[in-house]
Structure formats: structure tokens, C-alpha cells
Amino acid sequence: MLETTIAGSLPKPAWLAEPETLWAAWQLEGAALEEAKRDAALLWLKEQEDAGIDVVSNGEQFRVHFVHGFLESIEGIDWQKKTKMGIRDDRYVVEVPTVTAPVRRRGPVHGAEVRFTRAHTKQRLKFTLPGPMTICDTIADAHYGARPDMAMAFAEILNQEARELAALGVDLIQFDEPAFNVFMKDVKDWGIAALHKAIEGLDCTTAVHICYGYGIEANIQWKESLGGEWRQYEEIFPALNDSRIDQISLECADSHVPLELIGLLKDKAVMVGAINVADNAVESPEKVAATITAAMDYVDPERLLPCTNCGMAPMPRAVAAGKLKALAEGAALVRGKLAR
Ligand code: ZN
């Protein structure tokens, strides 16, 4: 009950990549880089276990970017052909690579890191992959002609990858879909269909993470534009509740999301974000417990998994470690109260 987990990323140690920088370049190369990634993953497994996190991850220590980390191993993408694109509905304008041919995996993408991670923890293991809609909102299309078609093509290769990772012992595969909070109509029209393709035949638990993003400037400004109540989830949760995805990850800590929207997910396990990733102040266990308790008005503790709002990659390492501990201690406080 109230099993804890994290949304995904954790900070890279300073010897692996520049600290407190989102998408920082690697500090090393070649074999030394590969060794350093493994060392960093070990460090975060230990930190999560020591903190008391129940379902652990490698903290995405093996990738720079949550979407490109997957795309780098995919055929059909021209990385030289940069297209200027407003992503997440023009929240950021960036130069993105371009799909110029059918997309295909060259081979396993994350297999080696998962094998390594699996071998070094007995905890249940989660692994995150970018969702098809978010991929399509992070790359330009000069081949498929329609976003739903490109999304289905990516869903197909995500499915191949996910099946291999599940066979290697991953207990939960989570697809990160921040784009779901931006293109709510598309979620219902084809976003969930693409996710269903991505989880087809998977025998592990499946999840989708839908957030309001990292605590970076563009996101902070966007959030300020959303008004006092953020009701994006309201448009998509009924469809997600009807979907075949097992768990939904959402943000609740210091958020303008009305908690009653959780009530729309009555048939799902809910990862409740109880850690604010946009604030370096480490929550007290009591504050985490209060967020969990407030969410329990809408989801019973058997279906509630205390989690972080989003990834913690851009935070100082000690802050992220402190927040892991606060999350586990906050959940333990609520468990203690329920046992009484
Ligand atoms: Zn997120």
C-alpha cells in the first residue's frame, strides 16, 4: 500500500555531465563514458534503496534527453536536417531533427543499460520511454505526412523495445507523454490508440506520465498562463480511465491541478506527484504526507503510488537525494496512520 516511486530522471553526478543543467552534454567519452553512466546508475539505485523507494529506476543516467535518448538509435531520422519547430504548442521553439524515411530500430536501444540495472537491484524496476505523441511533437516530419501515422510508426518500434525490456525483467514500463496536457483533443483522437499499440502484448505493468514539465523557465511562464485552476487533465482522464494503461502519473504537489480530477481515474492506479520538482526546498515528510492524504479523498490507498511531479534531472544532487527521502518518509507517515 502507498508504494513509492519516482517519475523518472535524477540528476547526473558532476563527473558525468554538467550539474544543474537540463540536457547537459557528457563530460567523458568512449569506454570511460559508458563506465561513468553505469557508476551513476549504481549510485542512484543505492540512494533510492537507502531512502526506501519501492519501485526504483536508473534515474535515466544513460541518456541526455528523454526523447532523443531513444531516437538516437532509430533509422529514418536525419539528424543533419534540422527543422525549426514550435513544440508543445509553441511553448519552446527549437531546432529538431527530421524524419525522412520509415522509422526502424537498428537493434535494441536500452537493453544493455536495463540488463545492468536489473542485475544490481532486487527492488521492482521501472523504465521510462518517450510516448508516441511526445516523440511526434519533438521531431519534424518530412515522410509520413500526418502526425497520427507517424505516431503509430513510432508506437510500433516502442512496442518492440518495450517487449524486450519486459523480457529482461523490467516490472513497469512508463511512457512519458507531457504532450498529452497540450493536445487534449488529439489524445482522444489518436494519442491513446498509439499508446495501446506501444503496450500491445506487454506482460509487465504499464504507465503513462503526464506532467506540466521540468521546473525550467519556459514551463514556469507557460504555467503562469494557465490560470488559477489547471483543468487539462479533466479533458483526457475519462478516456485514459477507459484505456488499457494500468497506471497514470500526474502532478499534485504545489500544483494548480484540482485534486478532485483524480476521481476521474477510478479504475486506475494513480502515481500522485507529492514532490515539487520546480523548487529546491526539500519537502518535510509531513508536507508529503499532507499531499498524499489530500489525494486519498479521491483514490484509495491501494491504488495510490506516491511519486514525484516530474523528473528531477536539473536539480542539485543533494536536493534530489533529500526529496527521495522525504517522499519515502511522507508515505511511511501516512501508512503508519492508516495502520492505527
Ligand atoms: Zn514530467
Image (cartoon, grey):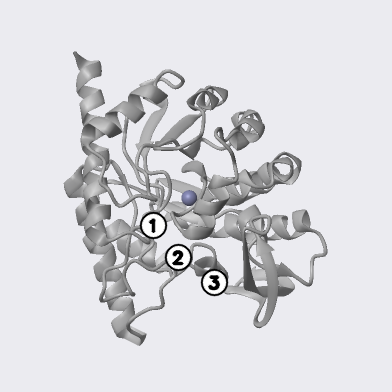
Q: Which mark is residue 287?
A: none
Report whether 213 appears left or right of 147: left
Task: From the viewer's side, name the closer residue of 45 and 162.
Answer: 45
For label 2, the crowd category at 10 Å Cα-Cα, with few meaning under 14, some 14 to 19 and many 20 or more, is some
Looking at numbered disc 3 in the image, what kind of residue is underneath it? Gly
The image position of residue 135, as x and y in percent, is 62, 60
Residue 267 versus residue 11 in the image, above or below:
above
Quarter of the view holding residue 331: top left
Q: Tag 2 or tag 1, which sits nearer the N-term?
A: 1
With 262 as the anchor, is 316 left or right in this view?
A: left
Left or right, 2 with respect to 303, comes to left
Three-letter amino acid code at disc 2? His
**Residue 62 shown left or right of residue 122 in the figure:** right
Mark toward the viewer: 2 or 3 = 2
User: Which badge, 1 or 3, comes first in the chain's sequence?
Assistant: 1
Q: Report the residue marked by disc 3.
A: 107
Find disc 1 in the rendering and name its residue. Answer: 9
Between the residue at mark 2 and the residue at mark 3, the CA separation in whole angstroms equals 9 Å
Between marks 1 and 2, how big is the CA–CA gap? 15 Å
Tell me, for residue 110, which label it has, or none: 2
Q: In the figure, residue 137 lies in which quadrant? A: bottom right
- Look at label 1 and name its amino acid: Ser
Query: In which quadrant of the rendered image does the C terminus lie?
Result: top left
Q: Nearer the viewer, mark 1 or mark 2?
A: 1
